[in-house]
Amino acid sequence: MIHAAVKLSKSVISLSRTSSVAATSSQPLRFLHDGTNGPSSNPVAVQMINYALSHARSQKSDESYAQGMLILEQCLSTQSSESEGQFAQNSIGAVLLAMSNLLYERGRFEEAIEKLHGVQGLTRSSLGVRVAATETLVGLYLQLGQDDTSSVLADKCLEFLHKDDLRSNGGSKESLIARAKAVKGLVELVTGNLESAESFFHGVQDTEARNGTAVLSYGEFLHATQQFSPAKELYQNIIEGVPKNEDFSDMNTLAICNMASDEVLLAATFALGQLESHMGNFGAAEEILTKALTKTEEYFGSSHPKVGVVLTCIALMYRNKARQE
C-alpha cells in the first residue's frame, strides 16, 4: 500500500491519518464504497426506481440526473405516507435510498445524508432497509471526516440487531449481523483502534451470505495489520465474486452510495494494487492500479477527486520502486 496516510479528501479514507509521507505504512487508502439493491416493496415503485437510476446514468449529465430525481419524487408522492405497514414503509425507504444514491453521485452529500436520515425514521420498515441507510451514513460521515458521528451511527446499527426480530427480515440474520458488526469495525479501524476492530470482524469471513462491503472492510483490517496473504485473497475474492445487483428485488441486500457493488469492486481493485506495492510486486501493482485508474475515470469522470487519489497512489508506487532499486 501507499507509504503514507494521505489526509482524506471527501472521497477517500486513510486508515491512519497521522502517518508521515515518508513512513513505510502498510495501511490501505480506501475509497468508501452505486446502483442500489433493494422483503417486500411496491413492484411499481421498484420499476420506477430502476428506470430513474438508469436514465440518470445514461448521460451522466446535470439534466439526466435532474430528470431521474423528478421521476423519484413522483414515485415518492404515489406512496402512502399515512400507512405504517412494512410494505408501504419499505417502498418509501427504497425511494429515499435511490434519491440519496443520485445525490451522492452528484457530490451533494448533505442532501443525500438528509434522505438517509429520513429512512432511519421508518421504524416499521424491514431491518435491511434501515441497516443499508445507517451503513451508508457511516460511510459518508467517514468520508467527511466526522468520525465521532460515524461511531454513534455504527452503534445505532448494532442496536437494531437487539431490538428487532431478525426472523421477520427474510432469513438474512447472519448477513445483517455481519454488516452491522463490520461497519462498526470499519469505524474502529479508521480511528486506529485495531484491537476493538478485530473483535467486530471476528466471524465475518465465515458468514455464509457474504456481503462485499463487510468482506472488504475485513480485508482492509488484515491489510492494516500486515496480514498480507489473507488480505490479498479477500481482495481477489471480492473482485471475482461481487454480484452486481442493480435493482430493488431484495431489501436485505440493499447497498447504495459508497457501499454499493460497483464502488466495492473499485475499492477492492485499488486496495489490491496498493497491497502488491507494499509487498514489492511493483509490476503487478502498476497493472492493477492502472486498471483502477481507468475504471475510476470511466465511472466518476476524469476530474473527480478519486482520480487524483489513484494518481497519487501510482506516483507513490513509482517512488517506492525507485527507492528499492
Image (tube, rainbow, N blue to C red):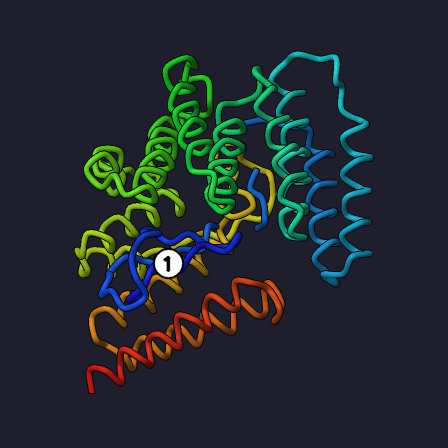
Q: Quadrant of residue 181?
A: top left
Residue at (60, 32) in percent of width and height: 116
Kindly state the secondary structure of the residue where label 1 is placed: strand
Q: Indicate the quadrant where residue 234 lies.
A: bottom left
Q: Is residue 108 above or below residue 251?
A: below
- Which of 116/179 is in front? 116
Name the one closer to the observer, 123 or 211: 123
Q: Is residue 195 left or right of residue 54?
A: left
Compared to residue 303, the image places residue 218 above or below, namely: above
Q: Position of residue 203 (x, y in %)?
A: 22, 36
Q: Nearer the viewer, residue 252 or 95?
A: 95
**Looking at this view, is 4 or 300 the one in front?**
4
- Name the residue tied to disc 1: 29
Residue 214 appears left or right of 303? left
195 w.r.t. 35: above or below = above
Percent coordinates x, y for residue 322 in the rendering: 27, 85
Percent coordinates x, y for residue 273 in the rendering: 34, 69
In percent of width and height, residue 205 lies at 25, 43
For disc 1, the neighbor class at 10 Å (few under 14, some 14 to 19, many from 20) is many
Q: Amino acid at mark 1?
A: Leu
The N terminus - image quarter: bottom left
